[in-house]
Image: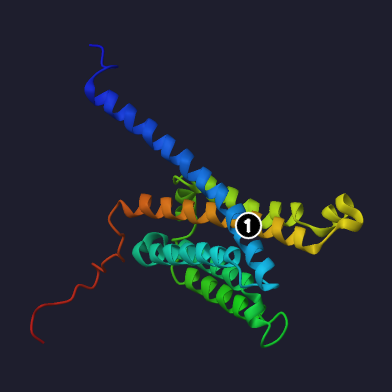
Amino acid sequence: MNTLHTPGHCGRTGTVIRTAILEFLLLCALVLTPPLLILIDLKIRHITGTLGENSLTEYAQALCLLVTVVLFALRAKQDFHARGFYLLVTGFFLCMLIREHDFLFDAVQHGWWKYPALAVTALALLGARSYPGTVLQAMARFTRAPGYSQLLTGLVVVMVFSRVFGTGALWQELMQEQYDNLYKSVIQEGLELLGYLLIAKACIRMHLHFGASAPQPAPVDTQHPISNCPS
């Protein structure tokens, strides 16, 4: 029997196509967000004469990282069999959030952000060590999850491409005496925001994917059951 044009098959095909179109439109919206926010920030700068760290671009970066940290922390809480891995991932992105807000810690001492970041790293490592057998297999499963490639792309954009393409030396060579440090900042911050948006989107998709299954609680100790008999 030819099932290529059955109503059920056509319905599934339509759903796949609509999902692909929505994914395309969402990615377009994400890509357009950094230049839009930067334009607004520049308008504010022209009016106030200053901008600094209090910009919509910086706030959007912080929001993306906060969403990522919270969702991975929830996964660590819900999935016992992957808890060690998710604690490490949560610690990693929390360190990135701390680094993005280094200006707050500079009020104590320049470069002081490293100390809370080191504390978070130590806690994440100790937490992962407390749950043996919940890191490597969970990591392998994580790399096969929908959104993993997008998360990886976002990390590459933030940690590599934004640093290289936004380096001052490149734009000084291009613009010579017309160079202004503002150009470097705009390019670098815009690329960082794009990367963080991709990471947050991928994290939300993964959370929905893993959350579709029931949370994995800690296993019950069957070797020492609690007796209901009176003592």
Q: Quadrant of the C terminus?
A: bottom left
Q: Residue furthest top?
A: 1
Q: Residue 49 placed where, x, y %?
A: 70, 72
**Nearer to us in this view, 10 or 76:** 10
Q: Residues within 10 Å of mark 1 (few under 14, many from 20)?
A: some
Q: Residue furthest left?
A: 230
Say which residue label 1 marks.
39
* Image side of residue 191 versus residue 164, left or right: left
Q: Residue 65 placed where, x, y %?
A: 53, 64
Residue 227 visible in the picture = yes
Residue at position x 61%, y 74% from top? 101
Q: Residue furthest front?
A: 47
Quarter occupied by residue 23? top left
* Image side of residue 226 versus residue 31, left or right: left
Q: Residue 103 placed where, x, y %?
A: 66, 77
What color scheme is it? rainbow
Quarter occupied by residue 53? bottom right
Q: Secondary structure at mark 1?
A: helix
Work out whether 86 lies above or below 160. Answer: below
**Nearer to us in this view, 213 or 36:** 36
Residue at position x 39%, y 30% from top? 17
Q: Quadrant of the N terminus?
A: top left
Work out whether 14 lies above or below 218. Answer: above
Work out whether 69 lies above or below 171. Answer: below
**Nearer to us in this view, 117 or 132:** 117
Q: Residue 172 placed where, x, y %?
A: 87, 56
Residue at position x 56%, y 75% from top? 120
Residue 52 visible in the picture = no
Number of numbered tags placed on the structure image: 1
* Image side of residue 77 versus residue 56, left or right: left
Instruction: Inspect the image, locate mark 1, and give the three-letter code of the amino acid beneath it.
Output: Leu
Residue at position x 28%, y 23% from top? 10
